[in-house]
Amino acid sequence: MNSGTHGLKLTYLSACLASLFVNQVVAADEQSASKNVNQENPIETVSIVGSRQAYQGNFSPLETPQSELRINSEALENAGAIDLNQALDLSASVARQNNFGGLWNSFALRGFVGDENLPSNYLVNGFNAGRGFGGSRDLSGIETVEVLKGPRAALFGRGEPGGTVNLVTKRPTFDTAGEIKISAGSYDTYRADIDYTTPVSDEVAVRFVGFFEDAGSFRDTIESTKQGFSPSIAWDISDESTLVYELEYAHQEVPFDRGVLAIDGELGRIPQSRFLGEPGDGPMEGDVLGHQVEFQHDFDQNWSALVGVNYRDTSLEGFATETGFDGIVDEEVDRFRRYRDYDATYQVFRAELTGNIEVAGLAHRLIVGVDSDKFENDQFALRDRTTEQYIKVFNPVYGELATDFSTQIDRLETQESLGVFVQDQISLTDKLDIRIGARFDDYQQTLNNRLSDSQSKQEETRVSPQFGIVYEASDTLSVYASYGENFRPLSGTDSSGDGFEPNQSTSAEAGIKFTLNDGALFGTIAIFKVEQDNLLVVDDPTNFTFAAIGEAESQGIEIDINGEIADGLTLWASYAYVDAKTKNAFFDANFGYTIEAGTDLLNVPEQQLSLQLVQLLELDGKEFEVGGGLVYVDKRNGYFGTDFTLPSYTIVRAFVAYEITESISLRAEVDNLFDKDYYTNSFADVWVQPGTPRSFRVSASYNF
């Protein structure tokens, strides 16, 4: 890669960001001067602390009968996380899954993942937003990543039984502040970020968040570019009412990369850098355009209403040449080529009322609401089935592009649902609370298979109950237990062209929550069990049809501890033991194997640990941070129906950060400090994602 070209790109981008900053500061100064001329007293600015989170209610962590892990911006920065996959490595309850050649986020929470043919769903400020296409989620506009574990269907509805992930975005404040950050790293990786917020009047504030990244890779021939922009505006209509609008735009160009393969069941026979696709395919292009509006009104100190609307349009398009499953013959592996054109829209509306009321001498904290969503999944794909394509795995020669395409997929799936929910947490005593909740869902799925010129439609109604109990033994300790039922719609069709009944699950957990060190350190210890029915398995890989015949269960223990353990010394520790297995035997036509009962679920380690320590020091009167951490991932099932296993791994990272002035700071980081070979996930022994070798990154930040 031409470093001179990258230098010019970075210089140009820096100039653009600096110009934007100067214009904004000048405008803010002119506005401030104008106000001071017209008013005798200076304006007192007040920061927006943050809008109330949807579905969350007014509960302290010790009062909540479920396990939750909140990864704030400081923890994300200390971990060097710039995308959602890296952020979720901080939670040992989350395991990486097949990421569709690096083009979407896929993860299992407490052992369970969603539809393997769609990205894992996540929430943004309580809105369902993860489904669809558009690339891996960048964290440039994200303040906090919440891992909300356990049964949540009574409020969130149609989600995963192990829990859900919620992203809390950066929103405007009424204090002018900003940051420009430029970084450079291994493999010709360059990135620039900007974050600027300011008031434009006494009632209105804006925020501009954006990034640009131009990156090479340790993978041969792989280069990518990503950019995004997330402006938002907050309007304090009155002392009781606030309106917030947020826009999300992102564009990514990333080559489709299935990773490496094992030879005779053995990984490491070819370099981790070896790319077995076709550089001539070019990148897949992913686009996201989203809008989110929230209106919050406080009727009084007890009652509040929240109304929100979200619309998200995503797309993914491009060619990809992928390794096949016929095995290696004469040091060659077969390949096939596909063209994909995927589009999805997601529309969500929600309204909820929260408040406190006393009935028969008992205090009730209520959440009552309604939501609706519509998900349209439009998929078109071509595949070459006639051209014989092979590539030598030890000495690849690129340049052969198949062109004899036929249509493989051409369908439009629409999922619509309407939900009504209620949750009541009742204080039986000053220390004992019970939680009762239920959700009613009316769900409809329509499938229009344009390839076979057939249509199908199904409707379902479901009630998802939730129960919980929490006892605050002291101001620093509580014990809890909870139970919930859940359902999740399933995409795709069976061999008859019909849809499926939703995936069903039950989930239970119990745990202890505690604070130490005068509240500076918080911890949760939980045990859990999850059971699922109607899991999708492949019925006909040629026609892309499925059968909902799988059953599985997951059980285990989790320990999460984070906070300050001594003066200036912070700890982040997350450990999970997860035993996730199939409950019944079934035939998986994807690879022609019978999956026996008791088989480990794919890519789910039995043990996982994330650990991080950061010490804040002082050097020459300035703040100096030094920190490090590790991620341990146990061995995992790497290929259903076989004994192929991904090996366990431990990777270590370290960083130092120094505040040169009040405005300028420097940071240096190294990932995979001991340069270990490791593999993060797989779909089969020919699609295995290798981890990044030792890499470095330096960055400079200017705060104003």
Image (tube, helix red, strand yellow):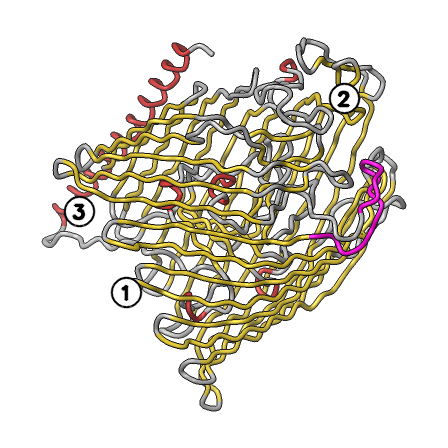
Instruction: Pick whichever of labels 1 and 2 is earlier in the sequence.
Output: 2
Evaluate whether residue 345 shows in this view: no
Q: Amino acid at mark 3?
A: Lys
Query: Neighbour class for label 1 at 10 Å: few (<14), some, many (≥20)?
Result: few
Element carrying mark 3: helix
Quickly name the residue at label 1: 518
Evaluate whether residue 525 shows in this view: yes
> Magenta part of the protein: which range?
581-595
Q: Amino acid at mark 2?
A: Phe
Quadrant in the picture for residue 492? top right
What residue is rendered at 23% in x and 39% in y? 28
Q: Nearer the viewer, mark 3 or mark 1?
A: 1
Residue 324, horizontal then vertical, whole percent: 76, 25
Instruction: Pick whichever of labels 3 and 1 is earlier in the sequence.
Output: 3
Nearer to us in this view, 27 or 497: 497
In the rendered structure, the answer to whether residue 40 lies left or right of residue 488 reads left
